[in-house]
Each structure stands twice: as C-alpha cells, then as structure tokens.
Image (cartoon, grey):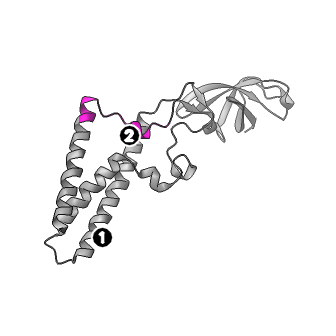
Amino acid sequence: MEHAVYFWSALIGCTLLVIQVILQIIGLGGDHEMDSTSPNADFDSGDVGNLDPAHGTQGNIFFGILSFKTLVAFAGIFGLTGLALERSTLGPINRIAFAALAGFVAMVVVAYMMRALYNLGSSGSVVIRNALGHQAEVYLRIPGKGEGHGKVTVEIQGRTFELPAVTDGEEIATGRVVKVVEIIGSETVKVVPA
C-alpha cells in the first residue's frame, strides 16, 4: 500500500510537471493563478503585483504558496522521496514524514521561483510609494508653505520621473536636492530640503 501511494504520487506529479513545462515552452501555459493585477496607468498608488503574504494580498502564508504548480511539485517530490527511502532502515512513519517534508520544501521552493518569474514579467507599472525617503532634484522651483506646485525629478524602481511637488516650508529653488517625505494624491510628492 505504501509503495502504491509513493508510486502514483510520483507518477502523477512528475507527469503533470512535464506537461506544464511543455505547455510553457510552446506558449500555452499562462501563469494565471498569480495574476492579481490589472494595471491601467503608469502610476499606481498601491502595490502593483505585491504577492507578499505579510502585506495581506494573499491573506495567509499558506494560501500564498498554494497553487496547482506547487501541489504538483509536492506530489512529485513526495513520491520520489518515498520511493527512494523504501529500502532504507527507516520505519514507515519516518519514511512518510521525510517524504512529506521533502514535498513541502519543494512546494515552497517552487512557490518562490514562480513568484520571482512572475515579478520578471510584471507590467512595469511604477509604485509611486517607492519614492518615499528617496532624494530628488528640484526641476521647477517649489513655492513655499504649500502655495503651489513645483516639479522634482526622482528615481523610482530604476527609472527617472518628473513629479509635481509641494513643500510646507520655505520656497525651494531649482537645482536643490530634496527628500520625499509624503505622497499626496496619485502622483504628487511632498518634499523637504535634504
């Protein structure tokens, strides 16, 4: 009975894995299970494509790694590990425990690899919140005491952007270096002299 469980788990898991790889190669294996975004602008005030369970997008770390691909990885590695340990001196409970542990490790590794691949193919939308704490250069003078907008150039996610800027302090002249301290609205930043 134990052999049959390992054998069928390995056979089904590895077969589905091979099918998934072939579908990916020919372009039919879209990664829809992790596509939680529909960006429609250059800027997004939220976290575009944030799949970090700690930030609540997936709600729970278990559900953050649970997908068809990770279940296939678990089944395949669980079965193969169980088959490899069958002739060992370990008892059945220990074999099952080691096989389940190996399957779980494979599941987590595949989840993080898929997340990394997903992030490589992200939409390119910029999360303006990533500008917080960064230095910027004043492009057009910023009137003092919030009495108008100026412009700053700031690097966000490896790209340079020109954004509207305000300040609560004195007027800031063109060319000065400032620090982004707050995001106002969808793309305006509040700055202070650096």
Quadrant of residue 143 within the rendered picture: top right
Neighbor class of circle 2 (other Cα within 10 Å; few <14, some 14-19, many 20+) is few
**Residue 117: which numbered mark, if any?**
2
> Is 84 left, or right, of 39 in this rendering?
left
Which portion, as a residue range, is magenta? 23-36
> Is 118 left, or right, of 172 in this rendering?
left
Mark earlier in primary sequence (2, 1): 1
Q: Looking at the image, can residue 84 be seen? A: no
Looking at the figure, which quarter contains the N terminus?
bottom left
Residue for point 57% across, 27% down:
160
Disc 2 marks which amino acid?
A: Leu
The residue lying toward the viewer, choosing from 98 and 148, is: 98
Residue for point 54% across, 35% down:
157
Nearest-to-viewer mark from 2 and 1: 1
Residue for point 63% across, 38% down:
129
Q: In the current view of this chain or complex, which residue is farthest to the top? A: 140
Residue 113 forms part of the magenta stretch? no
Q: Identify residue for label 1.
A: 97
User: How far across and down, in percent of the image, does residue 70 sit?
Assistant: 34, 50
Residue 35 forms part of the magenta stretch? yes
**What is the spatial separation of the Cα atoms under label 2 and label 1, in whole angstroms?**
30 Å
